[in-house]
Image: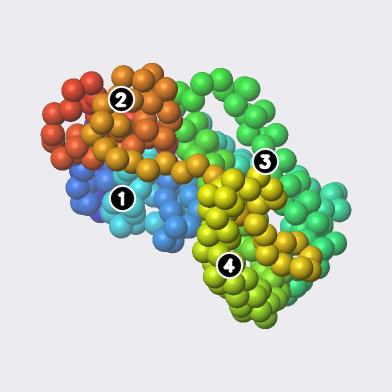
């Protein structure tokens, strides 16, 4: 495979790609430079290099130290250029990629803390002491990762490059993974307790419900009599103890409370519409905000509000 005219020029395509300026590319026109390639779908990154072999007047290629056909490799690496210094560090000195996270197994080689598998039988029986030890293991792992992240952030300051953004994203992904594993372990440990609680509820709820329904029914049957007796006392001018029923335990009487009866929604709304207490109420503001979002989303002009784009990392 002979060098193409464009490949013979220089490493300019690779240098421009490092700056984010990707030129046109074709599967039959690999460009010299230093790249990286996934080791299988979703696998780890491995270093790749394509260079001009002037003795052969052809392109040569190494992927993870193994000689490969540059024409077969090109489309897999062209979007992932890396600086020469990074390539040398990874390919020749065996260092990690700049965005790689600390190897916790290596960091904790001398630690007695182990990180249990949330799917193991021990993690699903809900034993309290085992659960505490498991939670402590997760907390230890999270703490070490947090310290590593904070130390790295203190060194770099603001994130200002793709590599730094990748590393920060990898930290976030690792914390998300820990969050999910811890949630799975918590759910597994809690499940036997919840199942027992549901079993107890299923046994006792019908009993309690039956007693409550019967109590309420009998009280409602007594209510007209007590109201009638109270009216009779007032009509006769008797100023004595209010009527009650029952001779054992707590006697049943009448409870008085004032309830609102709306006679005109329009009059009521007009009365309070200028009251600042109404508009300061958060629940009302939430309702208005929700309505405005719905209407603005439907391209309806709403005075006093507009939709703006908010970008957040997700």
Q: Is residue 27 left or right of residue 170?
A: left
Q: Are marks 1 and 4 in contact (CB under 8 Å)?
A: no
The reply to whether residue 97 is in sight is no
Tell me residue 51's x, y (percent): 36, 41
**SS at badge 3:** helix
Distance from Cα at disc 3 to Cα at disc 1: 36 Å
Q: Earlier in the sequence, mark 2 or mark 4?
A: 4
| Nearest to the observer: residue 19 or residue 184 | 184
Q: Earlier in the sequence, mark 1 or mark 4?
A: 1
**SS at badge 1:** helix
Q: Residues within 10 Å of mark 3 (few under 14, many from 20)?
A: some
**SS at badge 4:** helix
Distance from Cα at disc 3 to Cα at disc 4: 67 Å
Q: Is residue 78 left or right of residue 167?
A: left
Q: Residues within 10 Å of mark 4 (few under 14, many from 20)?
A: some
Tell me residue 207's x, y (percent): 66, 79
The reply to whether residue 150 is in sight is yes
Question: Mark 4 highlights which residue?
Answer: 222
When the figure is inspected, residue 173 is found, relative to residue 14, above or below; the finding is below
In the rendering, which numbered label is found on residue 145? 3
Give the label, 2 or 4, closer to the camera: 4
């Amino acid at each position: 495979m002979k060098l193409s005219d464009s490949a013979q020029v220089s490493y300019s395509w690779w240098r421009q790609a490092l700056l984010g300026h990707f030129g046109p590319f074709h599967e039959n026109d690999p460009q010299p430079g230093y790249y990286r390639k996934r080791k299988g779908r979703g696998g780890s990154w491995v270093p790749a290099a394509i260079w001009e072999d002037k003795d052969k007047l052809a392109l040569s290629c190494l992927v993870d130290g193994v000689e490969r056909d540059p024409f077969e490799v090109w489309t897999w690496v062209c979007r992932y250029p890396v600086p020469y210094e990074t390539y040398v560090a990874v390919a020749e000195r065996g260092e990690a990629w700049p965005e790689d996270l600390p190897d916790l197994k290596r960091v904790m080689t001398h630690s007695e803390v182990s990180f249990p598998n949330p799917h193991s039988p021990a993690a699903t029986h809900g034993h309290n002491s085992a659960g505490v030890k498991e939670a402590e293991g997760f907390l230890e792992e999270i703490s070490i990762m947090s310290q590593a992240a904070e130390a790295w952030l203190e060194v770099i300051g603001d994130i200002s490059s793709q590599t730094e953004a990748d590393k920060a994203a990898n930290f976030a992904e690792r914390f998300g993974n820990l969050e999910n594993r811890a949630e799975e372990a918590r759910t597994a440990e809690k499940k036997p307790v919840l199942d027992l609680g549901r079993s107890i509820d299923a046994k006792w709820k019908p009993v309690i419900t039956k007693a409550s329904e019967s109590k309420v029914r009998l009280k409602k049957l007594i209510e007209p009599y007590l109201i009638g007796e109270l009216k009779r006392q007032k009509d006769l001018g008797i100023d004595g103890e209010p009527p009650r029923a029952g001779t054992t335990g707590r006697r049943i009487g009448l409870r008085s409370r004032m309830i609102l009866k709306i006679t005109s929604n329009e009059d009521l709304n007009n009365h309070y519409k200028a009251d600042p207490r109404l508009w300061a109420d958060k629940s009302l503001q939430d309702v208005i905000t929700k309505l405005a979002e719905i209407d603005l989303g439907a391209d309806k002009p709403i005075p006093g509000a507009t939709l703006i784009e908010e970008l957040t990392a997700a």
